Amino acid sequence: MKKIILRSAQFLLIALFLTTCGERRAAEQNEETLAVTRDWKLGIAVWTFHTFGLPAALEKIDSAGVGYIEVPTFSKSGPDLNDSLIGDLSPAGIEKVKALVTRHNLTIESLYLAGGKTVDSWKKQFDKAKELGATFVTAEPPITMWDEIDSLAGIYGMKVAIHEHWKGASAYWDPDSVLAAIKNHPNFGACADLGHWPKSGVDPLEGIKKLEGHIIAIHLKDIAAFNNPNLKDVPVGTGVVDFPAVFAELKKQGFRGPIYIERDAEDLPSNLPSVIQTIRYYNELLSKLK
């Protein structure tokens, strides 16, 4: 009888030990997930509200409760600045934009550069990015200017996150073309557009895997079907992109950077409801990420 009791006690201790180890490991995994994902700076690409001037767009972004934005150089700056494009503003105009952004408790993490055919046109846009306090730029540099733009990025101390539009609209529709640009250009990286890739038949999960170690930022969007460049995006989580798998892969890679919600479609009266829906979906996914 004593042997049975002793053996039962041993089994109980072993079970308690295994349970404790399991709980400890689960806690460590949760902490590991938090350590990575707390550096995923959720933000909004101002292009999401491209039917509005910058002041109105910033009001909507502010109400969504995020802290980071990506501003295109081709955004209209608002009535107070004669609706001049961001890329054409004077230093005084740039200061007004900075004050407006600060008033909404937002941070310009990056500038989306429209680009150009001359080094001077690119230099002018890098100037604007630096003046606005961006930490990197997003762009699709002409293939013939890789060396010059990489050199400019080095001078300004800013990485170039190469963005991908779809096949026929961009040289960078395939992750392999982004890798070709990055090769031998230390200031180039990738801005992975999860909603544009499927238009060209590229699985976003495979795109993320191919670009491992080079991803500077994410454009968070969804699309209803593969291989249709004419489609507009749909609210995140309602299309074909496998976001749980994509987020798990980003976590596995140790990605740390901004994730910008971006809409191309124009919901009426604005894209704000779908943006808020995306923020909820994003937070729900992170809570389940192990």
Image: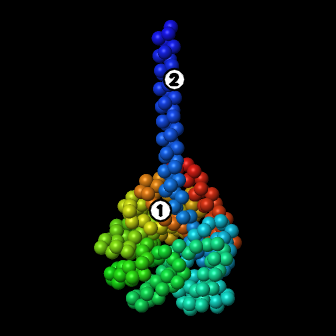
The crowd level at tag 1 (other Cα within 10 Å; few <14, some 14-19, many 20+) is: some
Q: Is residue 288 above or below residue 183?
A: above
Query: Residue 247: x percent and y percent?
Result: 49, 56
* Mark 1 or 2, closer to the camera: 2
Q: Which of these two is toward me, 27 or 114?
A: 27
Q: Is residue 40 visible?
A: yes
What residue is shown with label 2?
A: 12
State the residue at coordinates (42%, 74%): 159
Query: Residue 22: x percent and y percent?
Result: 49, 36
Q: Which mark is residue 9?
A: none
**Residue pushed farthest left?**
184
Mark found first going from the N terminus, 1 or 2? 2
Q: Residue 147's quadrant in the figure?
A: bottom left
State the residue at coordinates (53%, 86%): 87
Which amino acid type is marked by label 2?
Leu
Query: Residue 116: x percent and y percent?
Result: 43, 86
**Residue pushed farthest top?**
1
Q: Is residue 268 visible?
A: no
Looking at the image, residue 229 sits to the left or right of residue 75; the answer is left
State the residue at coordinates (64%, 89%): 81
Q: Label 1 vs label 2: CA separation? A: 43 Å
Determine whether the residue tagged by mark 2 lies in a helix, strand or loop: helix
What residue is shown with label 1?
A: 256
Q: Is residue 151 above or below residue 275?
A: below
Which amino acid type is marked by label 1?
Arg
Q: Residue 157's quadrant in the figure?
A: bottom left
Q: Residue 233's quadrant in the figure?
A: bottom right
Query: Residue 164: x percent and y percent?
Result: 44, 71
State the residue at coordinates (55%, 53%): 286
Determine whether the residue tagged by mark 1 lies in a helix, strand or loop: loop
Looking at the image, residue 175 sits to the left or right of residue 69; the answer is left
Q: Which of these two is toward me, 12 or 238?
A: 12
